[in-house]
Amino acid sequence: MLRLPDSGEEEGVEKKIAIAIDGPVGSGKSTIAKLVARELGYTYIDTGAMYRGIALKAKRMRISWEDAQRMASLAGSTEIVLLPATKEELTSRVLLDGEEVSCEIRETDIGEGASKSSTISGVRKALVKLQKGMAVSGGVVMEGRDIGTVVLPGAELKIFLTGSIEERAKRRFLELQKKGKKPEMREVIEEVRERDLRDSTRADSPLKKAEDAVEVDTTHMTIAQVVDTIVEMARELVRSKIQKQT
Ligand code: DC
């Protein structure tokens, strides 16, 4: 569930498109999607946070992340609300059955639980339905693993972010250090490798580039360069959309 801003369909108001951003762990998806959304005045939707919310609830209820039946029923009966980001607070807040869990869902084990439980079709079905509903009015930047391929196959702009495993692990390492943790680089590389493998080889909606997505390799790019590239593509699309209509 998400409160959406105006889609901008009235005359004189800038047309708004849907932007899908997919990519593996550490590719910069979240940071970039948030900044692109702020730059364009769009709503940022973090679908990974929804999988993380379900994984957290399962952990609390001592349900195995691999128990397909119980996890699917949990996903179907849980209320997940993403409170839109603001100009000051770029990250959207996450409410799980009414309780704010924005920090708790960022723990490493919950990321692993989200990756494991996201291989269950029943879990995906419940969350994809919610995600499609969130984007009906356009004006969204939605990030995840299957946005361009499954959730928003009709998105006007699809971006597939990549990056070398070393660079992505380095980003993850620095992120953990910033949180006061003392990670081991070797372990972080292994964790990233495992997540890549699980996310891209699962049977249902694996992480893959949509045929019509633009691939952006972020290994040697700054965040600002990636954001500018995507914002420019989006503005160009909006301009051509307006031209076609006049
Ligand atoms: O983007 P993230 O690290 O917060 O996502 C956590 C896990 O959730 C990720 O390993 C795979 C899963 N996920 C997914 O399967 N599909 C999505 N659209 C988003 C996340």
Image (spheres, rainbow, N blue to C red):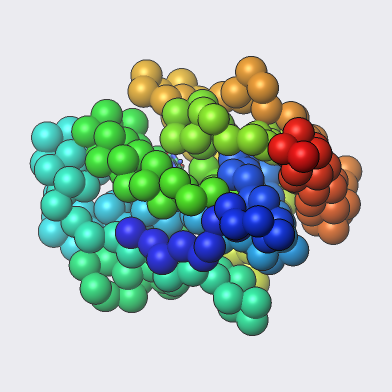
131 vs 138, nearest the viewer: 138
The residue under the point 44% across, 35% down is: 151
Residue 39 occupies quadrant: bottom right
Q: Position of residue 183 (x, y in %)?
A: 59, 60
Q: Nearer the viewer, residue 202 or 3?
A: 3
Which residue is painted at 27% across and 53% down in the image?
A: 54
Q: Please indicate whether residue 236 sits to the left or right of residue 116 in the image.
A: right
Q: Relative to 139, say whether 70 is above or below.
A: above
Give the vertical position of 98 relative to 135 (above or below): below
In which quadrant of the rendered image does the N terminus lie? bottom left
Residue nearer the viewer, 138 or 224: 138
- 92 versus 142 height, above or below: below
Q: Residue at x 32, y 69 (%)?
A: 95
In this rendering, the count of numbered labels is 0
Query: In the shown orientation, is residue 123 left or right of residue 109?
Result: left
Please state if 51 lies on the left or on the right of 243 as rendered. left
Q: Position of residue 17 (x, y in %)?
A: 63, 45
Which residue is pictured at 45% across the width and 29% down the height? 150
Q: Position of residue 14 (x, y in %)?
A: 70, 56
Report the front residue among 8 and 29.
Answer: 8
